[in-house]
Image (tube, rainbow, N blue to C red):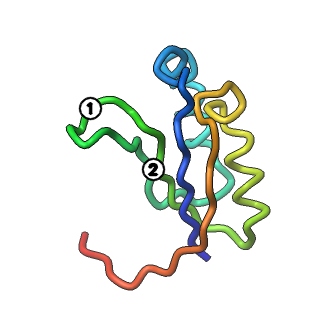
Amino acid sequence: MIWAIWCKDSGRAAAIRSQFGKDHSTYLTASPLPILMAGPLTGDDGEGSAGSLILVEADSRGAVEAFVSGDPFAVHGVWESFEVQAFRMSRKNL
C-alpha cells in the first residue's frame, strides 16, 4: 500500500534544518520502506520550507509512523507534527 506523509515544520525549523539535513538524507537513503517520492513543501513563492511530503510503500500505518518518528527531522524538532494517510494512485504522468 502507498502512504502519504505530510510533515509540518516547527517554528524553529529554519534555525535547525541545515544542522540535521545530512542526517535526514542519510536516513531516507537507508530507509527500509521503499520511498516513491520525497521533497520539501515550500511557500507559495517556491522559497523557504514549510515541511516535507513523502510517499512510501508499506504494509501498515504503524510501519510508516515508526519510520517517520525515527527521522532526524522528527527527532530533533524540525517537524512539529506529521500526518499519515493511505493513498491510492489513480493517475501517473511521468
Q: CA distance from mark 2 to mark 1?
A: 17 Å
Q: Which quadrant of the view contains residue 11?
A: top right
Which residue is at 74% across, 40% downward? 70
Left or right, residue 3 beside residue 71: left
Q: Residue at x 62, y 77 (%)?
A: 1
Percent across and percent down for residue 7 are 55, 46
Question: Residue 82 location, x and y as percent?
Answer: 62, 49
* Local SS, label 2: strand
**32 left or right of 5?**
right
Label 1: how many Cα within 10 Å (few below 14, some 14–19, many 20+): few
The residue singled out by tag 2 in the image is 38
Residue 50 figure quarter = top left
Residue furthest bottom as drawn: 90
**Mark 2 or mark 1, whichever is nearer to me:** 1
Element marked by disc 1: loop
* Residue at image mark 1: 47
Total residue callouts: 2
